[in-house]
Image (cartoon, rainbow, N blue to C red):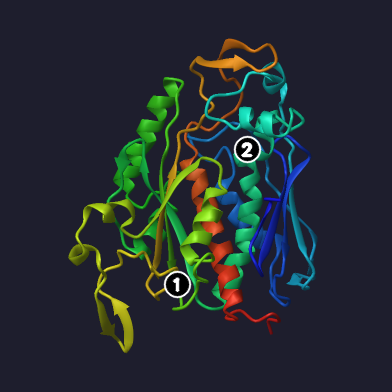
Amino acid sequence: MGNSLGKLFIITSFGESHGRCVGITIDGCPTGLPITEEDIQREVDKRKPGVSMAATKRAEEDKVEILSGIFNGITTGAPICLVIWNRDIDSSEYEKARFLPRPGHADYTAFMKYGGFNDFRGGGRFSGRITASFVMAGAIAKKLLNLIGIEVLAHTIEIGGVKAEPKGFDEIKENIQKNPIKCADLKAAEAMAKAIEKVKEEGDSLGGIIEGIALNIPVGLGEPVFGTLEGDLAKALFAIPAVKGVEFGSGFSAARKRGSENNDLFTIRNGKIVTVTNNAGGILGGISNGMPIVVRVAIKPTSSIAKSQQTVNIKDMENASLTVKGRHDVCIVPRAVAVVESMMAVTLCDFAMRAELIPRVIK
């Protein structure tokens, strides 16, 4: 089935938006890694609802609970099970619109695939709510990557057509803490916030672009031809609801360049082979080349909007209209930043373990 990801660092997602909980199991995590609920909670808090003007008013505490695999603050080598209990559930609007698939959502496809037996409340398994579990797994992956010096960071670079100016890694790391948009360009962050407020008043929504960066990547991660590094990273990122596009390095702009413009020339710097530019985004032939991995993720506008939209009644097979009510994000981008970061960390951790860069027992 499709709920697990990874070869050695294997995560399995479970739970639904309006079910009892959302959670993750992690199999293959090395033993001896110090980690606490507080360590995981810090990462989960980055995507909590209600922390920005763009977010849903669903007031979930998102408190992390460790069920297994960690004893006295140390991983034991057994499967790790982490859960977040759903506390603030209101399914009334979903019950009323049971047979009216929301445009842009997976309501229709899920209904047809599972014969109507799927949990439709809040989108069920197809809700952004399940990404809280991705971030829990990402917290552990980050701790493992820290052992070999790999650092992963994501930030907002565009919302509603407002684009951020490029910034250096250190400035990105510092500035994204200063605004709820998670944007390193503080001026652009203000413009993005205004765009979100405006569209909120209009009963609509906005999408945007998130950039992920991974530093200190060793040469050689990736398993061509069907287990390429960018292939598995893209797979992990596309598991995030609302992701509609992924590009590495120069991405689609490479199609408009000449080879002489897009090729990354090799040079030696401080005794290491590096490239002058990074149009490849840190990956050549599906294998990491030692340069920073740079990936951009396109997030579609939130599908649940207050405007009246055309739909159908699946049960009666009649045309219908729908105004989506409930508690929804006007723009999912700021909260998705932590999720992009986590899915990158999970994938890179798995590849690092395949390359035997992370020991099975940490001492």
Specify whether 12 is left or right of 157: right
Q: Position of residue 82 (x, y in %)?
A: 74, 56
Q: Nearer the viewer, residue 141 or 11?
A: 11
Q: Check whether the beta carbons of the residues at disc 1 and disc 2 lie within 8 A of each other.
A: no
Q: Residue at x 45, y 24 (%)?
A: 204
Indicate which label's residue lies in the foreground, 1 or 2. 1
- Residue 260 x %, y %: 18, 66
Residue drawn at the location 56% of the way across and 71% of the way down: 351
Return the residue found at the far bottom.
271
Residue located beneath label 2 in the image: 127
Left or right, residue 5 beside residue 203: right
Circle 1 SS class: strand
Q: CA distance from mark 1 to mark 2?
A: 32 Å
- Local SS, label 2: loop
For residue 342, what is the image quadrant?
bottom right
Q: Amino acid at mark 1?
A: Ile
Q: Nearer the viewer, residue 309 or 117?
A: 117
Numbered tag placed on residue 287 in the rendering:
1
